[in-house]
Structures are given as structure tokens and as C-alpha cells.
Image: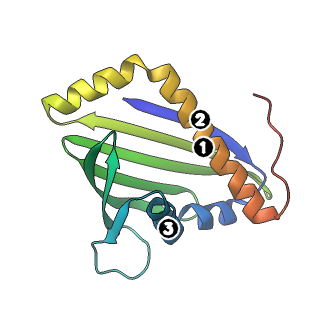
Amino acid sequence: MKLSTREDIVVPISDVFTQISDFGEFERRAMRRGAEISRSDPAAGPGEGSQWDASFTFRGKERKVKAYVEALIAPETLQVGSKSGGLDGMFEVRLVALSPSKTRMIVGLELKPTNLSARLLVQSLKLAKGTLNDRFSKAVSDFAKTLEVNHNGAQPRMTLS
């Protein structure tokens, strides 16, 4: 199953890449939401091969996820893979400079089941794909607005819903 969306951001591509590759900030966000995150690789800085172990409660059940950076190519590509209980995921962010101060962010998430229970989960997700795609697009849009506010220190751009 694939979800994808894109957003145009009034921030230079290098600044967008710096913010999307700030893994420490994403760790802190997840911990504020109740997840337990631990770095599982010896590397000090972010880069290909960086790995994390995470656990969190979702729908009343404890979930464990192993996440790893598959590609980090400045300033245009970030790919993060994940494995969790029969479900493999690939999250990709591609950046395209539209002008010196404007960037297009293309975000995709692909989920692949590796066992029967994960196949049933993905099949049920496909039935609600429209709703999921809307929620995914809104989350990416909100993140884009945050990037603009962090960069500009001003109000985010207005969008029509």
C-alpha cells in the first residue's frame, strides 16, 4: 500500500533538508507522545545506517519498530525504512528546488506485509485509503507549515482547504 503527497514550501532546499534530517528533533517529538526511542547503532551523527528501536502503545497494544536510514543524500533525498511485526515500511522524502527560496517536498510511505496478519491489516487499511491519504496529506501539510514558521519566524502561508 502506498500513500503520497507533495507540498510547496517557501524555504530554501538546503534549510528544508537540514530540518527533515534533524533526527534528534523527531526522537524528542516521539518521546513527547509516549514512545520509547533508543539509538541502536554506534554512529554519533545522522547518516545512512543510523538505526533506532522504538516501542509505543497503539490501539491498546504494545508495538515495537526498528527504523533505519536507508538513504540520506543532501539536499534532495531522505529514505527511512522500518520493520515491525510482519510489516515493512519505507518512508521517502524527495526535495526539488523550485527557486532559490521555494522547495517542493514530495513525501511517500509504502507498507509491505510479510505475514498473514500484516496482510489482513494492510487489506483493511486499503478499504480506508481515501481517509488515510487525506490524513497523511494533512499531516505533511502541517509539517510543511511548521518548517516555514521555523525558518521564517513568521506566520505560515495560507492554504485553501
What amino acid type should be assigned to the residue bearing mark 3?
A: Arg
Q: Residue at x 39, y 82 (%)?
A: 44
Q: CA distance from mark 2 to mark 3?
A: 22 Å
Label 2–label 3 contact, CB within 8 A = no
**Image quadrant of residue 109?**
top left
Disc ID at residue 137? 2
Q: CA distance from mark 3 to mark 1?
A: 18 Å
Mark sitting earlier along the chain (2/3): 3
What amino acid type should be assigned to the residue bearing mark 1?
A: Val
Is residue 137 visible to us here? yes
Label 3–label 1 contact, CB within 8 A = no
Which residue is tagged 1?
Answer: 140
Looking at the rendered structure, the secondary structure element under dot 1 is helix
Which residue is tagged 3?
Answer: 28
Report whether 122 appears left or right of 17.
Answer: left
From the viewer's perspective, is residue 57 above or below residue 7? Answer: below
Looking at the rendered structure, the secondary structure element under dot 3 is helix
